[in-house]
Amino acid sequence: MLQIENLSKTYRLDDRDVEALKEINFIAQPGEILGIVGKSGGGKSTLMKILRGMESFDSGRIILDDITITPTSSEEEIRAQMAATAIHLQRDFALWTESALNNIVRRIHSRKTGYEVLPIPEDADYEEMYREGLFYLSLVGLEKKANHLATILSGGEKQRLVIARQLAKKPKILLLDEPATMACPATKQEVLDSIKNVRDKLGLTIIVVSHLPEIHEYLADRLIWLEKGKIVADGKPREILNRFLAGIGKPEPLAPRRNLGPAIKVRDLSKRICQVCTGEVLEVLRMEKLNLDINKGEITSFIGNSGGGKTTLLQIIQGIRLPDEGAVYYRYGDDWVDMLTYSPQRMNVRRTLGIMYQEFALYAGETIIDQIAYHMGIKSIDVIGYARSVAEEMGISDKVLDIIYAMTDMSEENAKAALESLGLTRDIFNDLFPRFPNSEAQKFAEPIFELLSLDKSVLWKLPGHLSGGELVRASLAILLAARPEVMILDEPFGDIDPITLREVSNAIKKINSEFGTTIILVSHHVDFVEEVSHRAILMENGALIADGDPNEVCNAFISRCNAPYLINMQERYAVHG
């Protein structure tokens, strides 16, 4: 049994103290799935790290069977706590590049050796370790994938393999922080059913943190609502969720469709992606002769299960990934510019784009106003001419400059790799694209902050001092300060709570209504897509399966998912909107 008594934790930031947890008390019974829900920044992840032994606390105690942990516990007692618990973090896919079974056996062997190495056949319990490994794989439904390389498993299979590795530690408490929140519905269903099976077969106490009400309604025996570091309520999941979701804001109206014709034309696009595994070539995506238009001034959403080609298509539309065949044309004045072929006009088109990725991250050491000034420098109306003059002095050709400019829209990791391939560092961006003065950036930013309902004090804060909702809206504000004509948003809102997601949804609709911005987005949130979109497109295995009214397309998607947990979401969405 897990018992938490008067647990408190305060973070000491540069400018203030933040009470993350305030006198938390609860008991989790053996074999119970205990859910924890609440808005971003409420203390959920802090609590999970403390329960795992990854983080200290200021007062109170944790009692886990015969182990008692206090703020003054010894290193030996903390090690005992960590041995009795296991945690799976949403974005953690740390796996060995070998078979799924060997990934489990390494963890089993580590119980004896203290480190992860494979046993040798001469070990007395060699065969027993492999039998045990197959048992843990069977608990998460992966016994048929035992000999498959972990690196080529699907996203849902990797999630389940990570859970199996945690089970191989033989913990008393399994902590799951946002399990599969970023995944598609089919993947979520696989993971959720595995969690239920683990509880039923092993009788483990499982604590699940999730922002998604439908996950708690499907999984949890009991639910705790954590808000601003305090337990607001503790009880039956449906009752707690009804109270929690009563705080959701009203949806802003979606602007009428403008019928301004296409802003982007995708023509005869083909792309085949393969992986080589143990001498076998596996085709993971086949996109053939794909054609579609993205209409000016509309919000178009792509939806579909993982691996269907959504992100690949968006990267091709951006011009940072090449197809095998086809073209992508952007309307620029009276001309159509192909984003996949070099031309002097292509940089002009890129200047009008604002892009946000799944793994969006702001620079931790720069205030929001500094990051707005940087982005406005890269996207300013005069930047192309200035960059060309500097590039000429540096001996950089226009084609290479075009490549460098494309990197400013890449994710941090991809941009770093691309720059290194050219023998360059991020310093080249500062040479070619000077920042706006902060005073000018503030003039552009203030009306954007008002539009997004962001307090102006956020301008002078570091990203680490912002709540989850503030962080997402500040990221949108950074893009918007340069007034992009097209915004491309690749699932950057997957792991925020429904109340904050409504704020983000309203912000996106305001952007579209106020500025007429063409917005393309990918999301696995069916309710979000229905709420925010003029048009939805369902992709599956590289093909366009459905295209049209968001409600009809999302219903088609749900019917193809075979995901029972979504039934609760549909019922709840009908009640709460």
Image (spheres, rainbow, N blue to C red):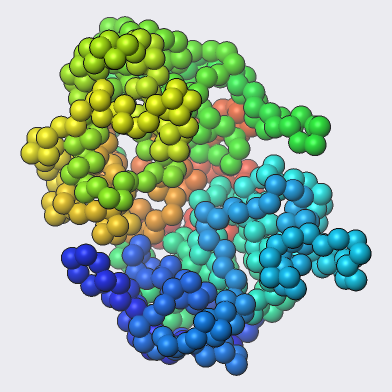
> Residue at the location (80% across, 36% down)?
278
Left or right: where 161 falls relative to 55: right
Q: Compared to 318, does 32 lie above or below?
A: below
Along the line of sight, the residue nearer the viewer: 529 or 268: 268
Q: How many marks?
A: 0
Q: Compared to 224, does 560 lie above or below?
A: above
Q: Is residue 486 visible?
A: no
Along the line of sight, the residue nearer the viewer: 309 or 428: 428
Quadrant location of the C terminus in the rendered image: bottom left
Percent x, y for residue 320? 45, 24
Along the line of sight, the residue nearer the viewer: 216 or 209: 209
Q: Is residue 146 visible?
A: yes
Percent x, y for residue 158? 65, 52
Percent x, y for residue 319? 44, 21
Left or right: where 394 falls relative to 30: left
Along the line of sight, the residue nearer the viewer: 476 or 346: 346
> Residue at the location (32% across, 46% down)?
362
Residue sitting at the far bottom:
66
Left or right: where 495 falls relative to 304: left
Percent x, y for residue 472? 31, 49
Q: Compared to 109, does 412 lie above or below?
A: above
Q: Compared to 436, does 270 lie above or below?
A: above
Quadrant location of the N terminus in the rendered image: bottom right
> Residue at the location (62% across, 77% down)?
83
> Residue at the location (62% across, 61% down)?
192
